[in-house]
Image: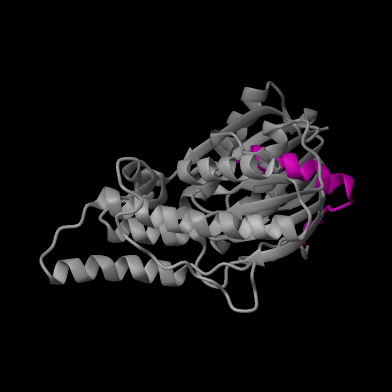
Amino acid sequence: MKILAIESSCDETAAAVVENGRVVLSSKIASQVEEHKIYGGVVPEIASRRHAEAISGIVDAALEEAGVTLDDIDAVAVTYAPGLIGALLVGVNYAKALAYSKNLKLIPVHHLRSHIAANYITFPELKPPFFCLIVSGGHSHLVEVKDYTDFRIIGKTRDDAAGEALDKAARSMGLSYPGGLNLDREAKNGDKNAFKFPRPRVQDAPYDFSFSGLKTSVINTIHNAKQKGEEINVADLGASFLNAVTSFLCDNTEKAAKDFGHTKIVLAGGVSANSVLREKMEALCKKNNWELYLPRLDLCGDNAAMVGAQAYYEFLSGNTADLSLNAFATMPIDDITV
């Protein structure tokens, strides 16, 4: 089954052709990073306009790279939640028009489910059940993946997501957008023990995350140094902050996996590309003799290949939509609405 997949949830316009959920025939991305870099972050209105300009060309490019036409496609899949609502609507409306014009099945796909599915491409042998840590700019979740379309949230952030905290901390340190990526690079030359940051805990919710306090702590550290006329070593500060954030993520993952009896661990989301997090997860799983699955670096960020991978399993579960399909800015991974 060949699926044409479309992704436009944030600032990447992407299209891909994926066969049977595991084989990527093409994957094309039109990035807006350089434009949003001017503003220090994604500007939703600009993102929506750029999606509208790029989507037709990027879909054509994906079909051409795959060596197919729309007549060879069996279904159209699209990210419909969660994300920037204007950006999502561009993809959803384009996908609906395409499906209608060619009388194709329309498959709505949840963005976080797609990030998990990036691992199905990286590891064709991977099958549920497993335990997954999803870490991105807008989400931090611990999820039991019982089956391809059956999810249970074990823990999640109560405020900022880990990726958001990294981006805002990086901006406070004077690093350019994308902050998390540049912070990772800068921290490689730093001392992770140079600064001490709190280890947050959420009362009565041992698997949940809270990153707002950590973010505030690093901002206060910078402000206090400026008031005293002191210079801060950005590499040391970045390494220390990154160590605190990734330790929190790994500690909760270990506790939840042990408590729920999981030995197969999967990492997903944009922050899964972070080198410190990957190293710590590898060490954690080695210590506990657990299996670890890390997505390929080119599949960590937003892309349409992962959408096509998850769409295959959504289709097999009967999760299709008609032309009334709408986009949603927020939606839990375990309770989708079409």
Quarter of the image where one finds residue 287:
top right
The answer to if 212 sits in the magenta stretch is no
The vertical placement of 181 against 196, above or below, is above
Residue furthest toward the bottom?
A: 203
- In the image, 174 versus 290, the foreground residue is 290
Q: Residue at x 84, y 53 (%)?
A: 319
User: Quadrant location of residue 329?
Assistant: bottom right
Q: Is residue 61 above or below residue 209?
A: above
* 56 on left or right of 182: right
**Residue furthest toward the top?**
67
**Quadrant of the image for the N terminus?**
top right
Q: Closer to the camera, 240 or 275?
A: 240
User: In the visual, does 162 lie left or right of 222?
Assistant: right
Who is closer to the viewer here, 330 or 73? 330
Q: Residue furthest left?
A: 229
Magenta stretch containing residue 305, yes or no?
A: yes
Q: Position of residue 316 (x, y in %)?
A: 88, 45
Q: Which residues are magenta?
A: 303-324
In the image, 174: left or right of 149? left
The picture quadrant where one finds residue 216 is bottom left
| Residue beneath the point at 59% across and 37% down | 299
